[in-house]
Amino acid sequence: MTSPAFKTEILALLKTPVDGNEICRAYFDKMTRRYLSRIISDELIEEHRKAPSGRHSEALGRVLAYFRRLPASRQYQLRKAPNGKFGIVRMPTRRNARGSPVGVATFETVEAGYHGIFLLKLKDMMEADNG
Amino acid sequence: MSDFQRQATQWVNPLSVWGTAEGVDVVQTVTSPNPRDTWDANEAYKAKIHKVGRFRWHLVWPNHGENLWKRWRWWPTRRNVLGIHGLYNRKTLKAEKKIDDRRPIYWLICLLIIAIAPVLFPTGMENTLLSAGAIFCIFAAINVCWTLVVGTASIFSLATYAVVGVSAFMTTWLSMRYGLPWYSLPVFGSAIGLLMGWLIAFPALRLDGFYYALLTLGLNELCRVFFTTSKAFGSASGGLYGADTYIPSDLSPFAQSIFGYYGAFALLLAALFLFRFVNGKRLGRILRMAPEKREAFAQACGVDYRSARVKIFLITSAALGFIGGFYVAQYRGVAFSIFSFDTVLLGLAMLTIGGIGKAEGAILGTLVVTFLDKVLIGIGPLRYFLIGLLMLGVVLFLNKGYFGIKKQFNAWRDKKRGEWRSIRSEKGGEALPEEATELDNKDELFFRRFDKMQRDHLKKMICPEIIEEHRLRPLGQHSEALERVLYYFRRAPMEDKYALHHIAATDRYKIIAFSGERGVSPRVVEDKEYEHVDDAYHAIFMRRIHDLMES
């Protein structure tokens, strides 16, 4: 409980009283990110590139489990363009809304698109202020 | 399992960010193999398998159809020319025809080849081959008769050539002395042969095989000594020649050779007919009911095998006498070499190489030996070594000569088939098909199969790294490989499951094993006591690993 990052986050939360569960969850999430950032390696990314779906090693399995658990606001989707390529869009949080495109990169296959999303999420995680 | 390569890796404890009690954050471990590989390895056939349905060149005849009752028969019997039966192919459901015994076809083809052989002989060698062919036919006829004696009648007589020789000398002498025509010589020969057979047959009823063979060999030697020293039988000239012959003397030498060849071929056919009608009819069948060493049983059942043997011996002796007379009618006389020991041995080699007891064996053996002996004269005495080697090879590697190869091969193939089947039904804790039918709970079967796969899978992960990891921290978070192994151990049934017994008095721990039955106390596994509970946990772990690797 001595992490400075945690302190800033908690202080922000304390300014406006909220559900205590939220505080606890934010703390757990941060610790998980801290752990996951330790096990991210080039081999892990390469493993995901080779096989985005299917059976993975334990480390990659833990990373992917974390990514799947993220709230909808931090999830991404693939959208198929008329030219048959796939682009990444942010998942809409409102019903019947259309997701906004993320970047201009397009992918030839669904698998490449999955890996693109994985890299995006990885970037989000590593860039998180409290990681 | 052996092709799996373990890969070392580092495992970071997920709890390390929270701070663990032991301070073990990073451990060396191995990657966990893909369970799919274990599954596939267990599902796969270990034995080599082949694609089926490749018998496209396998000749299958259609069924008789409307011609069911129109068959060729041996006149005047109702016997069919070929043993054929109709059947439905179980795969294609088509009506097919199967020949039960293809030997008549092979016989016909081989005899046709012998019949047209003079046309096929290479130019320049016709004379050699024609004379060798005639000798082959005569010797084959003798050996077919000999096979009747040794094979069908089980009388180990070595006096076959003595009968032929005596008959030949006597008929030559009669022909020279009384001017008998050639066509009467085989008839007189038969009578002489029958007389000889009658003389030799009686000791056969008294003496055992080996002693009888010696006796007949002595008889052969006696004949040789008698005829070579007798002036009346041409002791001075090496043989007796001058009998009447059926080969016209006004023909060219080549035509005479052809004449002699076909005459000998006719003799061979006659010998084969004799074989067929003795071996395949009543006498042969009686003796097949009384095989060697089971005569007493056959006799008790009312099979008079002794008289059948003597009858066959007498018939054969008459036939051998006939051949002796024919020999004289072909070559105008006979040489002393017919009694010599090497003739007997060569004849024995012919029988052995082809396989005793079969007409085709006798003929093939004769063909091989005659070819080596008469055609390959150029290679000198080496050819006798070749004959010896052939004989040795047959005796060492084959059970019943060349014509026993198929049966021997089939037996060998059945043996191999059994071995392959045992490879396929690898047990390894799984239920065998025989057991499976007796188990009512089929879940049990699948559990055993799953458990075997599970053990195969876990064995791949057992390595010094995870043992060391367990030693450092028996409880708590573990790497994937170790965790999977521990899950399996925890899930084991209670019967013989290891546990720790805390000895309160000394505050030490001992390993025990549960009985698995309520009210039955656990048994002590070993006397060793552990001071720390973690050491005891690790000792149990090592025991379980040992059990796993042994299973």
Image (cartoon, rainbow, N blue to C red):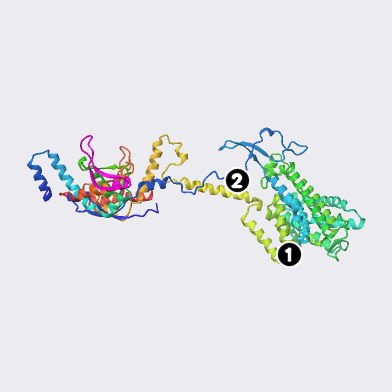
- Residue displayed at 57% across by 50% down: B412
Q: Amino acid at mark 2?
A: Trp
In which image quadrant can residue B93 be found? Answer: top right
**Chain of the residue under label 1:** B
Q: Is residue B159 visible?
A: no
Q: What element does badge 1 sit on?
A: helix
Magenta segment boundaries in residue numbering: A85-114
Where in the figure is residue B177, as x and y percent of width and height?
A: 91, 57
Q: Amino acid at mark 1?
A: Ile
In the rendering, which numbered label is found on residue B377? 1
Q: Residues within 10 Å of mark 2 (few under 14, many from 20)?
A: few
Residue picked out by circle 2: B57
Q: Nearer the viewer, mark 1 or mark 2?
A: 2
Is residue B381 rendered magenta in the image? Answer: no
Mark 1 or 2, nearer chain start: 2
Q: CA distance from mark 1 to mark 2?
A: 42 Å
Please identify the residue farthest to the left as the structure is shown: A15
Q: Could you say which is closer to the camera, residue B113 or residue B365?
A: B113
- Residue displayed at 53% across by 44% down: B52
Please identify the residue farthest to the right as the structure is shown: B178
Taking B36 as reference, is B238 left or right? right
Where in the figure is residue B218, as x and y percent of width and height?
A: 76, 58
Q: Could you say which is closer to the camera, residue B249 or residue B384?
A: B249
Taking A58 as reference, is B295 left or right? right
Q: What element does badge 2 sit on?
A: loop
Where in the figure is residue B485, as x and y percent of width and height?
A: 31, 48
Q: CB of mark 1 within 8 Å of CB of mark 2? A: no
Where in the figure is residue B432, as x and y percent of width and height?
A: 45, 42
Is residue A110 rendered magenta in the image? Answer: yes
